[in-house]
Amino acid sequence: QAIRFDYSHARAFVQSDEWEKLAKPIFQAHEMLHKRTGPGSNYLGWIDWPVQYDRAEYTRIKRIAARIQADSDVLLIIGIGGSCLGAKAALDFLNHSFYNLLPASKRSTPEIHFVGNNISPVYLAHLMEVLEGKRVSINVISKSGTTLEPAIAFRLFRDWLEKRLGREEARKRIYVTTDKARGALRKLAECEGYETFVIPEDIGGRFSVLTPVGLLPIAVSGVDIDALLQGAADARMNYLVPDIEENPCYQYAGIRNILYGKGKQVEVVVNYEPRFRSFAEWWKQLFGESEGKDGKGLFPASAEFSADLHSLGQYIQDGVRLLFETVISVKRPAIDVRIQPEGEEVDGLHFLSGKTMNDVNQKAFAGTMLAHVDGGVPNLVVEIPEATAYYLGGLFYFFQKACGISGYLLGINPFDQPGVEAYKANMLALLGKPGYELQKAELEVRLRG
Ligand code: PA5
């Protein structure tokens, strides 16, 4: 069973000739991707990665994950953007909803916390309180090795660990995932003798979840990374045909571009399971950073139903008609709960007797979809049979490939992120980094108003 893509609830918004006209550009985008002739072609290592990863390093990931499981109460992941969102997506999607809160009798793997993905002193100080008295290991992840947020967090937590354990012991608990040769983090790791893992040069951050970037933290949580990679490897085969009629991944890429061309400027990825929340964050980064450039691109947003039906739902049903939705749905939830009748019918809910929570959730989904379609919001559905590592690997691959194809259809380079540099340069200038003196003076004049 593969991932199912259903666009029947968007067909009414698309003319058949628009659909037919897609065949050629889709084929061209496929050729650009696979023949590596399009923009950003130095960053296409993710296409074959699920079958061409470094086997020796993979074995080492499993060995180190087992060591961290045995000697740590907490794994601290330091990274931002593509260097943390994939791992967080997988951990939340596949593990217990309250993973970190489970008592030791129910969880034999370490707590996992994230830091370095914001610059909040409050978050940092609170996290340090949570870590007190626990055996902590650190996995710092940064491809460039120079990103300020994780670099600051690593400096502080390295110091924190060294003060508690001494430099020698701390060294044994620090794992670095970075570029093979370049960057400050690589230099530091070599100087200190930290255990390191490589982020392949030809794979950008947001396409790196299936490399050591995601695999080490995911393996530490006890998830079956063989199944995750197998799911991605099978998806690689499933989404290889250049024909839009036969390739659901290309259908998704194509239809979102048609809708964009018709004034739908926002794609809302929707889920009915809170454990999908972080997956939506990963998806938003993948599409936002890949497509939002040259004045173009769908704005990727997310909503969690039914909670957001009581907030954003009003806008989606009735506000400016600039949205379409992509629902990510799981056919069979891991657990279901039956609603039993309780004595007299005082709550008016006997019509639900014998149904399960999933029955209700599925009807909420179906009813919402039809209501939103009636309100002018096309709905796309990506369905997986179960929330397992295998299907998650497939989903990661499905969206990564769709993103590459979609970016080429849009006429942009999906594999760079020039827009991210503007805030960084201003921040560094304002902080007084040597070399930015002129910019600092100009910015300060502007801030004074
Ligand atoms: O997708 C990307 O390339 C970015 O989101 C990066 O992952 C993010 O900026 C972090 O970069 P780095 O891993 O170099 O610290």
Image (tube, helix red, strand yellow):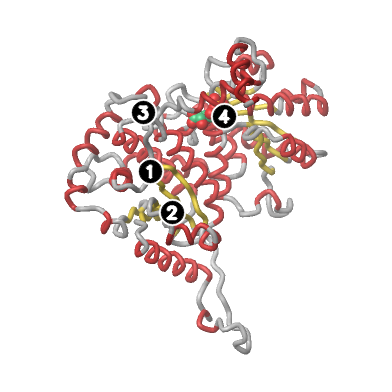
Query: Quick one: SS at disc 1?
Result: helix
Disc 2 residue type? Ile
Given this view, does label 2 or label 3 mark the residue nearer the observer?
A: 3
Mark 2 vs mark 4, CA separation in Å: 33 Å
Tell me which label, 2 or 4, sits earlier in the chain.
4
Given this view, does label 4 or label 1 mark the residue nearer the observer?
A: 1
Tell me which label, 3 or 1, sits earlier in the chain.
1
Closest to the observer, 317 or 399 = 317
Disc 1 residue type? Phe
Q: Residue furthest bottom?
A: 344
The picture places residue 324, in percent across and down from the top left corner, at: 38, 52
C-beta proximity under 8 Å, tags 4 and 1: no
Closest to the observer, 257 or 107 = 257
The picture places residue 38, in percent across and down from the top left corner, at: 30, 26
Whether residue 253 is situated above or below residue 81 in the rendered picture: below
Mark 3 vs mark 4, CA separation in Å: 34 Å
Tell me which label, 2 or 1, sits earlier in the chain.
2
Pointer 3 residue: 413
Disc 4 residue type? Arg
Given this view, does label 3 or label 4 mark the residue nearer the observer?
A: 3
Q: Residue furthest front?
A: 449
Pointer 2 residue: 328
Query: Quick one: SS at disc 3?
Result: loop
Mark 4 CB lies closer than 8 A to ligand 1: no
Which residue appears at 49% of the width and 50% of the height? Answer: 302
Pointer 4 residue: 60
Mark 2 vs mark 1, CA separation in Å: 12 Å
Tell me which label, 4 or 1, sits earlier in the chain.
4
The picture places residue 326, in percent across and down from the top left corner, at: 40, 52
Pointer 1 residue: 398
Query: Quick one: SS at disc 4?
Result: helix
